[in-house]
Amino acid sequence: MEDGAETFSSEIQTVSSRVSNEEPRTPNTELKKLLFFKVYRRRWLALLILCLLNCSNATLWLTFAPVADQSAKFLEVSLDKINWLSLVYMVVAIPLSFVTTWMLDTLGLRTTLILGAWLNMFGALLRFFGAALFLSKDHTVRYLTVMLGQTLAALAQPLIIFTPTKMAALWFPDHQRATANMIASMSNPVGILLASILSPVIAQTSLHIPNLLLVYAVPACIICFLATLGIRSSSPPTPPSASAESSSSEPFLQGIKLLMTNKAYLVLLVCFGSGIAVFTCFSTLLEQILCVTGYTNTFAGLCGALFIVFGVVGAAVLGVYVDKTKKFIEATKVNMCFTAISCIAFSVVCLMPHQKAAVAVVCSLFGFFGFSIYPVAMELSVECSYPVGEATSAGLVFVSGQIQSVLYIVLLQALTKRLADSPLSTCGDAVLSWKVPMMVMAGLCTFFTCCFVIFFHTRYRRLEAEEQAVYGTKPTDVSTTSERSECGDENLPAGS
């Protein structure tokens, strides 16, 4: 199969060079025959399994955050240690991410996803057994066992969350890539949504924590079975697009070097990584922030649900729009600006008691504009860094987000102050003021948004490469416009 792919690529290059001096908008007949791309229905099954796996792993990540008080009481630890059950995902992901990008670009999707599914299942089971078996035992052993299970699930996260961009590139044609990436990426916040709703409902008291862990363990086992049997290959027999032929064409270390010298990519790496960190802080600390001003865990869960639901809606709308127009840069910059405004609004209204409607609306807008950026920005990371492997370019952005998430959460917690008296608080014994941390979070979000809007400029390298393969045109030194992208898409002979 590899020999056939190399022959196919060499034929494309030969014919492309042969027609390079011809009229750029007239496809060559011989080239069109070589570039008749086919797609396979089983790509939707692979996408479904990835979505379920991504969703399950997200529920394991955010299991304890919506019920932090009950979890702390059951495990007999402080709230800081409960936060570390979420933070361990970021800490583990940072070193493992480099291994994951290498695995995806070298060993392939199948091996990476199946390993992630098994780690996800073992982590979920260990959390449950640790909580159930040590109900009346030493609380230190109970916490450490749950933390070990959480760590195994954290090991699975990079193996799963790096995959959408790679799967979209290998299995889907160019006019479905952003949509496929959006569907797979948004399954992660759907998992966060489920955790935000189910955790407060199931764990109304600390004694219900083992039941909560069992509810999340059962789907993890079923999804592991589906992944093991349902994902039969890393890539389809024939490529769905011209760029899929050369996916991962750059060696891993060489790809890293290219990324570190790509100015546009570095701007995206830092600025969008900061956006990921802000959203991680929001999801992890929401319940602790709102309880100070008298809002219940149930209301905090509702706000988290609105945050996710509107985020998924926004991502769906933006994904379809970008697939049709190819306006990656414009869509990302506009939405980042609205996200910064929403973050500023949240930092103000979250400190106001008796303002449920305002808090709910702001959380909805924050999710609508913010979450919709994620899949588009991941596609943009590939466009500005092509031909570096998709897992490498998208993976490093995620690593940046994880590193900044740890720093942000530690910083925001350090900036809190204990309140002597808070009559409205529903937080239990520990009542902290989040006024300064929220202002700092809004300031960071605004600063990096301005940096991205001002300094980020790039060509759409992958789209140019596909256009060159079809029409034999030479790559340009200016940004690819939406008009050129649309013309290329209309004439690209891809399957549907």
Image: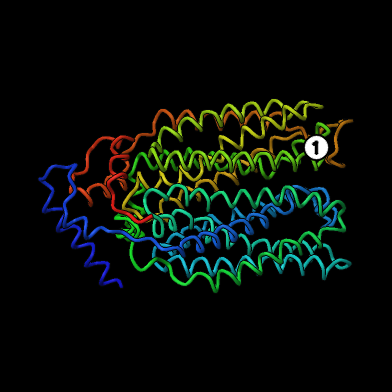
Quadrant of res 207: bottom right
Give the SS element for disc 1.
helix
Along the horizontal axis of the image, is 227 left or right of 432? left
Q: Is residue 185 visible?
A: yes
- Percent x, y of residue 211: 81, 62
Residue 369 is situated, as x and y percent measured from the top left of the image, at 56, 34
* Front residue of 420 and 456: 456
Frontmost residue, 245 versus 70: 245
Q: Is residue 77 left or right of residue 163?
A: right
Percent x, y for residue 51?
A: 56, 57
The structure residue drawn at horizontal position 45% and vertical position 32%, both measured from the top left corner, is 333
In the image, what residue type sits under mark 1? Cys
Residue 345, placed above or below residue 111: above
* Residue drawn at 65 percent across, 26 percent down: 345
Asked if one can make out residue 249 in the rendered structure from this viewpoint, the answer is no
Neighbor class of circle 1 (other Cα within 10 Å; few <14, some 14-19, many 20+) is many
52 vs 11, left or right, is right
Tell me the residue that label 1 is attached to.
Answer: 291
